[in-house]
Amino acid sequence: MPKRRLERLWAPWRYAYVVSIKEEKECFLCKAAIDKDDEANLVVYRGDRIIVVLNKYPYNPGHLLIAPIRHVPSIEDLNDKELFELAKTIRLSKLVLDEVYKPNGYNIGINLGKAAGAGLEGHLHVHIVPRWIGDTNFIVVLSNTKVIVEALNQSYRKLKTAFSEVG
């Protein structure tokens, strides 16, 4: 039987995340809402009450976080104007993702509380994840590793441009 070679999947951009998990003290969504450096904060769209941020650690290319600018932990904390703009921004985001990525489907949802998988419990946000038939394959099953096929800066440029054209 031939000896199997150890394969490596290099993902050096993940190191900053691994190191920063314990270091993060401030809410990255609040920082993105206040800071005007949209590219550094991956902000692809700004509304009056809502921002859209490209997920820095995506499940798939185009994975967006849609959040109120105001720091609130749960959906019932939104006022009517924020709730309405959130719904409109989810719709707008889907239309933009349809245009840019042409996915076969979406996962759209909110993780409320640590038990539900919320990584950031204090600032409500909606995930919108484009999905394609076959986007989960043997690598995920065998090695618990997800391959992202597009660099964040490429995703950012595409989405920032698309949002500016339709928003």
Image: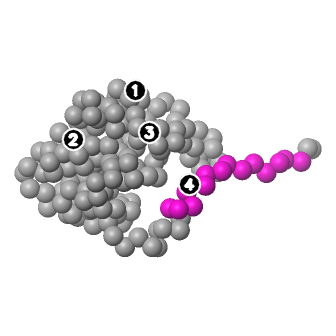
Residue 12 picture location, percent across and down: 61, 55
| Residue 89: numbered disc | 2
- Identify residue for label 4: 13
Give whichever of discs 3 and 4 has the lower sequence position.
4
23 lies above or below 109: below
Answer whether labels 2 and 3 touch (C-beta < 8 Å).
Answer: no
Closest to the observer: 111 or 72?
A: 72
Q: Secondary structure at mark 2?
A: helix
**Residue at mark 1 to residue at mark 3: CA–CA distance:** 14 Å
Give the residue at x 92% y 44%.
1
Q: Is residue 15 magenta?
A: yes
Rounded to the nearest angstrom, the CA distance separating label 2 from label 4 is 29 Å
Mark 1: amino acid: Lys
Q: Secondary structure at mark 4?
A: loop
Residue 18 seen in render: yes
Q: In the image, is residue 139 part of the stretch drawn in magenta?
A: no
Q: Nearer the viewer, residue 106 or 154?
A: 154
Which element type, helix, strand or loop, lies under badge 3? helix
Q: In the image, what residue occupies the spot 33% across and 53% down?
A: 37
Residue 112 in sight: no
Give how far across and how far down residue 54 sits, in percent: 38, 47
Query: Seen in the image, is 17 located left or right of residue 163?
Result: right
Does residue 48 appear left or right of residue 35 in this picture?
left
Q: In front: mark 2 or mark 4?
A: 4
> Badge 1 is on which residue?
102
Q: Residue furthest right?
A: 1
Q: Which residues are magenta?
A: 3-17
Q: Which residue is mark 3?
A: 155
